[in-house]
Amino acid sequence: MTAFCGLQLAHPVVNGSGTFDAIAARRAFGPALDGAFPFAAYVSKTITLEPREGNPPPRLYETPGGMINSIGLPNKGLAGYLEHDLPELARLPVPLITNVMGSTADEVVRLVEAVDARREIAAIELNVSCPNVKTGLDLGADPAELGALVRAVRPRTAKPLIVKLTPNTADVALVAQAAEDAGADAVSLINTLRAFAPHPDGSGAPWLGGGTGGMSGPAVRAVALAQVAAVARRVALPVIGMGGVASGRHARQFLDAGATLVAVGTESFRDPAAGARIARELGAESANSGNR
Amino acid sequence: MSEPDGRQVAPFGRRPVTLTERREHGAYVVLVAPDPHGPAPQPGQFYMLAAAERWGGGPDERPFLPRAFSVQRADAAGLHFMLEDVGPGTGRLCELGPGDELWLTGPLGTGFSGPGDGRRAILCGGGVGTAPLAILQDDLRARGVPAAALLGFRDAAHAAGAELLHGARVATDDGSVGHHGLVTDLLRDELEAGGAAVVYSCGPPPMLEAVRALCAELGVEAQLALEAGMACGFGACFGCVVPVRGGGYLRVCVDGPVVDAGRLETALVAGAGH
């Protein structure tokens, strides 16, 4: 068992937010999904106050050893999530972590209060890769902004509060420190790296409907490992490490860098059951750790 | 289990299969692999495929993600897939031969449905979009449903793909085989010949859009098998969206690939780019 913020998890592998839609996966794979659920906790995609359709296509671009996405956080909005998705997600055999995002502290407070009221939800993750509508700065890119946000939210919930850090900042460890000082219970990183996909027609125009996108997959793993290590050295909080994890060996590298849990994202696109495989491989790695 | 929307549920996760056959039909390659641990697919469903070896390391160090393919036939020999080498993913798959391993996930998505009410079927498509019409024709023939097949291709090398169906009428862009013109010319003739029909279509976006528009004009039901670039195939990535009439998007992988044409304002959507 792995302890994380008071939760007892069967193993240290969870999903990255927005990389595994458990409700759609049930349509594709049927009820067998629940019996073989690949993650020790399930992190929802990002929920916003109002429904979002997401960005116009194209939304995907394949890169060497990875991909760029410009999905645009499509979701049913808070009310739609609570009414339609939560009852289905509550039937999953693992604890549920709900990821929320707002563009002001007031919006985030409203989201957190609504999520806090639902006992089906074990923990809350804040997506702070959103521009502040007043300053234009990403909420999670600036230690002072992030600290103010977490201080506003912290008193509104007793549930574990995880801050999902953006790698698109000058010093991610400083931001993590601000989250810790403001009362966060954990941090998760890395979110995707901002990236540009040139149109294949050679015009220099963006390929993605959203203009720029976020890069993920094995190509970002070395960057993620450096950021996870920097954060783990700086703060005492538990860390969920992610970025290009495709095997138990990669998961071990994140744990060695100081992570408590490891999240799998892009690899689930290639192998829907990747989370379970990686947890198995990690168990075998740990059993042989005397020989490392 | 088979659901009302023509969806056969897939085993969870990807599984290895071994190719037993590779055939060429002009510009196309057909790969065949027995899938002893998978259920029989519904016509119109698709699989995510990746080569087990050297998936990556091609042009631009790609491919990385698996690629989506409608199943072209499912019989005693196994699952048949029809490919054209148009990019690093299809290029790598087209290199494979008997004994090579694939990673496979599926069957995924919705299949074609009906007609169950005495209407005849018209199969109309082209290019690699021929694939799901072949398995649909097998199914309709087994059920005794009359089905005309109309296929459009660029040129003679591609028109060899028509061999995958029985008795197809062919149109080519360059006139080298069959009707010199669009497959929708043949479709209009077929629809105006009379008799209630359901049109089943799969092909490049401009062709699908022409089929959609013609069926809308003549008030004929049409089921379109869509294609879109996708990372996962099971609803996780939200990458394969197509705009729907009235606003919003559907995910081709879980809400399609087969959709009722009436749901779309246009079928002219960004293609797959394999």
Image: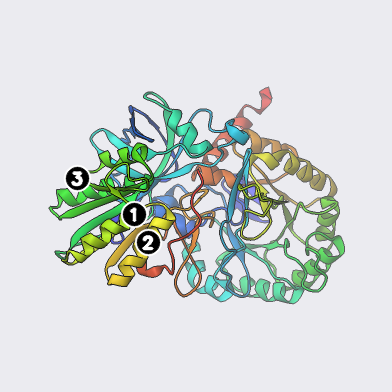
Q: What residue is rendered at 74% in x and 77% in y?
A: A106
Horizontal arrangement in the rendering, residue B11 relative to residue A210 (left or right): left
| Dot 1 amino acid type | Leu
Q: Give the quadrant of the C terminus of chain A.
A: top right
Q: What residue is rendered at 85% in x and 48% in y?
A: A234
| Dot 2 amino acid type | Ala
Q: Is residue B260 visible?
A: no
Q: CA distance from mark 2 to mark 1?
A: 9 Å
Please identify the quarter of the rendering in which residue B62 is found. Answer: top right
Q: Give the quadrant of the N terminus of chain A.
A: top right
Q: Position of residue A156 (x, y in %)?
A: 72, 73
| Dot 3 amino acid type | Gly
B56 or A98: nearer the viewer: B56
Query: Compared to A117, does B231 lie above or below?
Result: above
Q: Position of residue A77 (x, y in %)?
A: 58, 72
Query: Compared to A9, does B262 lie above or below?
Result: below
Residue beneath disc 3: B167
Residue beneath disc 2: B210
Residue beneath disc 1: B182
Q: CA distance from mark 3 to mark 1?
A: 18 Å
Query: Which one is in front in this view, the residue at disc 2 or the one at disc 1?
Result: 1
Residues tagged 2 and 1 counted as in contact (Cβ below 8 A):
yes
Whichever of labels 2 and 3 marks the residue nearer the N terminus, that label is 3
